[in-house]
Every structure is written in structure tokens, then in C-alpha cells.
Amino acid sequence: MTELFECMIINVNVKTIIILLIMEGVLRMALENKCQCAEESDQEKYTRISEIIDEYKNKEGSLIQILHLAQGIYGHIPLELQKFIAQRLDMPLSQVSGVITFYSFFSTQPRGENTIKVCLGTACYVRGSKKIIDRLIELLKVQVGETTTDGKFTLEVMRCIGACGLAPAITINDEVYKQVNPDKLKSILKEFEEVKK
Ligand code: FES
């Protein structure tokens, strides 16, 4: 009985050590693979994207995955990068551009630290989202799709996010702001900047 008990303890300890080693390996991999966007040259980024294309190109429905990873490396997907991906995948540029245009999480412009999206769904539009856009254009001094000169905010529009009952809605990064009044925008932006400091 004692031997059996000792054997169980040894087994538990061996399992614990294995789990710790796996966790250490995962942690080390995560640290080694951390984003180096700011340090990498364009050439290095294109090389990495090329390797990703090689890895995914023969898999079905790989375009979105490739674009997602490419945006993670490059930060956004400018026309030159779209052409590169289209050529390497041997597909029309219009197909690549079409996917980027369709999905709002892809961006062709460098994004700011914070992305503001104004809902242009029917309920929000009827309740004044156009006035919100106009006020944001005035406050941020950018047009829709542009980033402020200090790189703090990118202004975009989006489709309905399901908060129609409390329209008009906007999002700043992952946070949803409901029943937004154009007069409240200045304090929302200020508060947000203060939080980020
Ligand atoms: S229309 Fe804006 S949240 Fe639905």
C-alpha cells in the first residue's frame, strides 16, 4: 500500500514537472514571437509575409487568414502589399481588395492608437449618427478613414453592431458607447485620452 502511495506521489510530481516545462516552453515561444513591427524593415516584413503565403496558399479559404496575418505584421494592408499578395497567390488584385473592403477589421491605412467607429446602420442613422460623424470630423480634423496627425485616433464607420435599441452607437476600440450625443463626444475623447496616459 505504501509503495503504491509513493508511486502515486512520484507520478504526480513527474506530471507537475512536465506541465511546468511545457508552460515554460510556451512562454518562451510567446516571448520570442512577440511583435517586432516597429523594429523590422519593410523588406523583413515582406519576407515574413511571403513565408506565410507559402505556408497557407494551398489551403482552402486561406486568403482571409493570410490577410489577417499580413496585417498583424505590417500594421495595415496598403495597395502595394495587396498587389504582392495577389501576385503570390496568383489571383486577381480585385479579389484581394474585395475581401479587404468587405471586412471592416482590415485596414488599408495606418491606424491610430485608438479606432473610433460610428455605426451607420438604419437605427443609428435615423437617430443622428451623421451628426456624430460631422462632430468627430470637426474635433479630430480628419475625414472618415483617416488618422489624426498625432496618431491617436482613426475614424471609421461600421455596420449595425446590434445595439439598435440604444442608438446611436459608436465604438472606441472594443468599448461600445450607446445613445451618443454629439455634445458628449469631446468629453468622451478627453476621458479616453486621460485613461490611456
Ligand atoms: S443600427 Fe446601429 S447598432 Fe444597430
Image (spheres, helix red, strand yellow):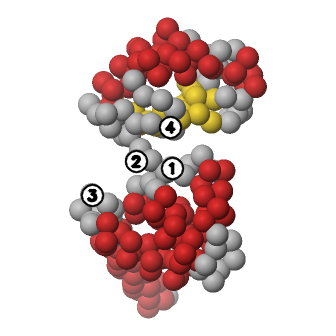
Residue highlighted by disc 3: 38
User: Earlier along the polypeptide chain: callout 3 or callout 4?
Assistant: 3
Give the residue displayed 53% in from the left and 12% down from the top. 182
Residue highlighted by disc 2: 110
Residue farthest toward the left in the current orientation of the protein: 39
Judge the density around disc 1: few (<14), some (14-19), many (≥20) Cα neighbours within 10 Å.
Answer: some
* Badge 3 amino acid: Ala
Label 1 to label 2, Cα distance in Å?
Answer: 7 Å
* Badge 2 amino acid: Pro
Label 3 sits on a secondary structure element that is loop
In front: mark 3 or mark 1? 1
Label 1 sits on a secondary structure element that is loop
User: Earlier along the polypeptide chain: callout 4 or callout 1?
Assistant: 1
Q: Can residue 31 be seen at all in this image of the molecule?
A: no
Image coordinates of residue 24 in percent, x first then y, are 33, 73
Q: Considering the image in quadrants, where does the C terminus appear?
A: top left
Label 4 sits on a secondary structure element that is loop
Label 3 to label 2, Cα distance in Å?
Answer: 13 Å
- Closer to the camera in the image, 46 or 16: 46
User: Earlier along the polypeptide chain: callout 3 or callout 2?
Assistant: 3
Image coordinates of residue 98 in percent, x first then y, are 66, 56
- Closer to the camera in the image, 127 or 29: 127
Residue highlighted by disc 1: 107
Label 4 to label 2, Cα distance in Å?
Answer: 10 Å
Q: Are marks 1 and 2 in contact (CB under 8 Å)?
A: yes
Give the residue displayed 65% in from the left and 15% down from the top. 128
Judge the density around disc 2: few (<14), some (14-19), many (≥20) Cα neighbours within 10 Å.
Answer: some
Label 4 to label 1, Cα distance in Å?
Answer: 9 Å
* Label 2 residue near ligand 1, CB within 8 Å: no
* Badge 1 amino acid: Ser
